[in-house]
Amino acid sequence: MKKLLVSTALSAISLFAHHGVASPGVVGLEGPGAPVETTSSATLPEGKFLAYMKLDYASYEKFTPVIDEETDESYYWMYGLGYGFTSYFSGYVFSPYYTKRLENSEETSGFHDINLMGVVGFKYDEGFMLVPAGESLDDLEEWHFTAFLNISLPTGNSELKKADGTLYDAGMQLSFGGPSFMAGVSATRWFGNEWTFVADSSYNTFTEHTYSDGTRVKFADEIRVNTALTYRLYVNTKKRLRIDTNLEANYLHLGRDEENGIPQKATGGDILYNTAGFRIFYNNVSAALGLKVPVWTRLNEEDLQQGSEGKEKYRVIFSFSSLF
């Protein structure tokens, strides 16, 4: 059976302000495609490392002419290292770096909480089984799945203060203050030609944290459902070059943040994003570029939620990864 020419890409789910997680995917020069945001159902090759970097830049709408504390923009960097322990299990360590800037030029910037992730790969071939080593192209036409678990550790600073000595809002801090937990699944079907369908779903929950001023905050739980179609535009096997394009629908449901046990106004709701982008593979490296925009929102207090998910003018997403 013809073996894969393997290159890799990491598809990361990155969120505004105090939220951020990441999920992996692998693709070959031949075989399934990997979207920009939606999680592809592939594990790393056994004994291989993956180095990864991603930038998610968001520009937010402004609602008043006055220069005030409205959110202006955010830069969310994600650095990661993955390892294929077996053909069906991969482990990752991620270190996020945030810059969150307000319209009045105040900002917080620094490393956020470290994330640890484990991914188990399955396939369906007359029954479910763990992904075997050395799959052929014919094998990759079958349904593939992953189950993943992510835990964040409170390694960032949750006590950043303004010039007047008061604490920044919890959403401007560089740590959740306690661990968070995310579980999810993905499914991928390559149709044996240029097209690949990918879908994933995840649930993320946060623990309550008490700040030095006595305020107790629990960030809202999150539910995500993503779907994507990728299309292989071009392949040059001799040059080990591949170019894909993709279109994604990214749904997010947010609960309400809680402060001192009380659900907060101007938090929570439902958002649907569309993401369009390209991915290029060359030798053992991959780069992706995408534009993500909210196309439908139903926020709980729409007029008061400037600077939250769903109020972006746009997001620009860039990622780079290398297998070694």
Image (cartoon, rainbow, N blue to C red):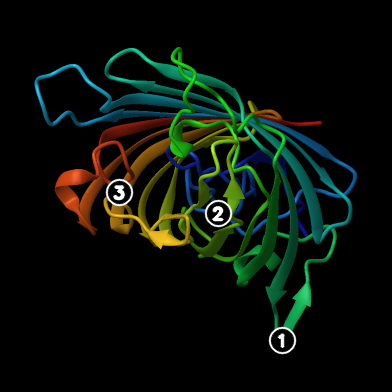
Q: Residue at x 42, y 49 (%)?
A: 231
Does residue 319 appear anywhere in the picture?
Answer: yes
Left or right of 27, for residue 155: right
Quadrant assignment for the N terminus: bottom right
Q: At 38% from the left edge and 38% from the top edge, which residue is drawn?
A: 277
Give the number of the mark in front: 1 or 2: 2
Q: Could you give the CA–CA distance between mark 1 and mark 2, rounded to whole angstroms?
A: 22 Å
SS class, disc 3:
strand
**Mark 1 or mark 2: whose residue is earlier in sequence:** 2
Give how far across and how far down residue 261 sits, in percent: 47, 61
Q: Whole-percent x and y of residue 203?
A: 54, 64
Q: Name the residue under label 1.
A: 127
In the rendered image, which quarter contains the C terminus? Answer: top right
> In the rendered image, which residue does mark 2 sit on?
39
Label 2: which secondary element: loop
Query: Disc 1, disc 2: CB below 8 Å?
Result: no
Q: Residues within 10 Å of mark 2 (few under 14, many from 20)?
A: many
- Please tell me whether residue 229 is drawn above or below residue 98 in the rendered image: below
> Label 1 sits on what residue type?
Gly
| Image-based side of 287 in relation to 304, left or right | right
35 shown above or below 188: above
Image disc number at residue 211: none
Task: Please say whether residue 225 is visible from this viewpoint.
Answer: no
Do the numbered discs 1 and 3 sit on residues whose CB atoms are within 8 Å? Answer: no
- Gap between marks 3 and 2, in whole Å? 15 Å
- Left or right? Give the position of 122 relative to 55: right
Q: In which quarter of the image is residue 144?
A: bottom right
Secondary structure under tag 1 reads loop
* Residue annotated with mark 3: 274
| Residue 67 or residue 237, whichever sits in front | 67
* Displayed quadrant of residue 285: top right
Q: How dense is the environment of label 1, judged by Cα within 10 Å: few (below 14), some, or many (20 and up)?
A: few
